[in-house]
């Protein structure tokens, strides 16, 4: 009787937990798994009989599909890459806006038109034609210099964004490592650390938007998070990233590369938002 009441109370508590977290990001619905307890022998006039002793909670598990998670993480990286490329291309289009009479195409057309006029018979003899060719050349040069300056500002802005996102990745991997330790510690004595697992999956969800990731769950419940062949997080350790500044005098900007802080070896995110930013900068 008491076991049945306790089992039902756990079920009610779990239902309440599900309801109150219905709007929580990344929350996985939990369910109680029950089983009949071991029966006991009772003597009867016909011999021994097995009498049931009630029901007990076996486990509380999450409604989570690991294969769907892996698919999501793969597609999240692709989406992050495409989104970063699209955002930066939109910025370039805003700089090279040829929708009005002030665009680069218009300046080029006027410049070549002025030179074609000079190339006609007697065209170079005209003072007006010579001044026009000179002025259109100056305007074209000013426009190109202006666009180059805007591109330099954009590249600097993208590198600032890159540095912030590398710091964010380090925060995420640090959080995953802490949750690894907490989950393996709690589950070592039985049960499932469901809420902690949700929190860890949420961090992996976020990480997958920045870089390519694959996840392997270890026997103790911890995650090994691999990014493009590099293990960012393991059972009890993680690799921290850092950006390194390199002066680029030719383009008048400071370039940044990403490497592992401990080994100083280069890091390639493979895909994701970080790779999208890097590729966008490289193409400018």
Image (cartoon, rainbow, N blue to C red):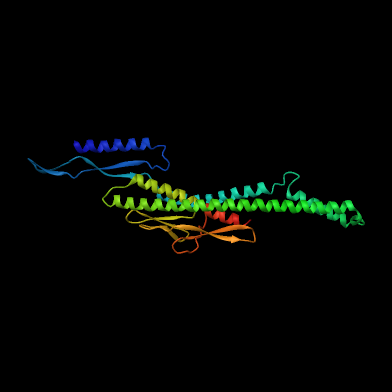
Label tally: 0
Q: Position of residue 234 (x, y in %)?
A: 38, 58
Q: Is residue 6 above or below residue 75?
A: above
Instruction: Tell me the residue at 33%/53% (across/down).
Output: 181
Q: Position of residue 212 (x, y in %)?
A: 49, 55
State left or right for residue 4 relative to residue 220. Answer: left
Instruction: Tell me the residue at 57%/52% (across/down).
Output: 158
Q: Is residue 17 above or below residue 187?
A: above
State left or right for residue 242 relative to residue 49. Answer: right
**Residue 280's image quarter?**
bottom right
Location of the C terminus by quadrant is: bottom right
State left or right for residue 200 relative to residue 79. Answer: left
Instruction: Tell me the residue at 74%/52% (across/down).
Output: 142
Residue farthest to the left, as pictured: 45
Residue placed most toward the observer, 241 or 198: 241
Location of the N terminus by quadrant is: top left
Q: Position of residue 177 (x, y in %)?
A: 38, 53
Q: Position of residue 187 (x, y in %)?
A: 29, 50
Residue placed most toward the observer, 183 or 44: 183
């Amino acid at each position: 009787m008491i076991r049945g009441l306790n089992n039902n109370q756990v079920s009610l508590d779990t239902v309440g937990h599900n309801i109150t977290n219905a709007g929580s990001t990344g929350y996985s619905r939990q369910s109680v798994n029950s089983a009949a307890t071991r029966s006991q022998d009772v003597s009867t006039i016909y011999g021994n009989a097995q009498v049931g002793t009630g029901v007990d909670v076996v486990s509380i598990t999450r409604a989570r599909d690991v294969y769907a998670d892996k698919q999501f993480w793969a597609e999240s990286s692709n989406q992050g890459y495409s989104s970063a490329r699209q955002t930066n291309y939109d910025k370039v289009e805003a700089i090279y806006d040829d929708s009005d009479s002030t665009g680069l195409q218009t300046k080029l057309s006027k410049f070549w038109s002025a030179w074609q006029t000079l190339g006609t018979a007697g065209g170079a003899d005209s003072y007006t034609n010579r001044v026009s060719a000179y002025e259109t050349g100056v305007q074209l040069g000013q426009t190109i210099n202006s666009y180059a300056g805007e591109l330099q500002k954009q590249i600097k802005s993208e590198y600032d964004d890159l540095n912030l996102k590398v710091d964010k990745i380090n925060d995420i991997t640090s959080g995953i490592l802490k949750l690894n330790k907490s989950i393996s510690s709690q589950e070592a004595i039985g049960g499932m650390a469901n809420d902690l697992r949700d929190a860890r999956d949420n961090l992996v969800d976020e990480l997958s938007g920045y870089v390519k990731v694959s996840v392997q769950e270890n026997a103790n419940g911890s995650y090994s998070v691999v990014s493009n062949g590099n293990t960012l997080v393991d059972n009890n350790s993680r690799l921290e990233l850092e950006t390194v500044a390199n002066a680029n005098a030719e383009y008048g900007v400071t370039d940044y590369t990403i490497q592992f802080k401990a080994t100083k070896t280069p890091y390639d995110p493979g895909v994701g938002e970080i790779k999208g930013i890097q590729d966008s900068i490289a193409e400018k």
